[in-house]
């Protein structure tokens, strides 16, 4: 039995089309061909169940392990981007572009 290394495999899925495109860009920067599936279903949100409107990111099987490693690194980095305000020393989550305590912009 031969493995088809050029078969598409799902590596990631998201409810958010923007996040799927971010992942697509990350993988393409590493010279990994990417296919998005379900992107057109985002326009039907509210008409179809949310779990059926996911956008999935697919890569060739031969690149699956490399893509998974990049995603693990991305997800670890995303979790650890909390920052401390230089003005008031408050810790802010990665979603904040300004300190929620004093309003100082993230540098």
Image (tube, helix red, strand yellow):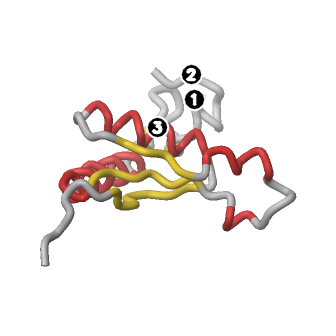
The extreme right residue here reads 47
Work out whether 65 lies above or below 16: below
Q: Quadrant of the N terminus?
A: bottom left
Q: Residue at x 64, y 30 (%)?
A: 102
Residue 22 marker: 3
Q: Nearer the viewer, residue 63 or 1?
A: 1
Say whether marks 1 and 3 touch (CB < 8 Å): no
Real-space Cα separation, disc 2 to disc 1, in angstroms? 6 Å
Secondary structure at badge 3 equals helix
**Residue to which mark 1 is pinned:** 97
- Image position of 95 with respect to 38: above or below: above
The quarter holding residue 12 reads bottom left
Determine whether label 2 and label 1 are within 8 Å by CB. yes
Is residue 82 left or right of 30 when viewed as pictured? right
In 3D space, how far apart are the residues under numbered discs 1 and 3 (Cα atoms)?
Answer: 19 Å
- Say which residue label 2 marks: 105
Q: Residue at x 53, y 51 (%)?
A: 37
């Amino acid at each position: 039995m031969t493995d088809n290394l050029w078969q598409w495999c799902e590596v990631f899925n998201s409810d958010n089309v923007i996040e799927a495109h971010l992942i697509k860009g990350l993988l393409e920067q590493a010279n990994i061909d990417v296919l998005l599936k379900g992107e057109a279903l985002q326009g039907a949100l509210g008409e179809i169940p949310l779990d059926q409107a996911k956008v999935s990111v697919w890569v060739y099987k031969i690149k699956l392990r490399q893509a998974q490693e990049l995603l693990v690194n991305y997800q670890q980095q995303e979790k650890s981007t909390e920052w401390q305000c230089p003005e008031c020393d408050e810790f802010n989550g990665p979603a904040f572009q300004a300190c929620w305590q004093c309003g100082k912009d993230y540098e």
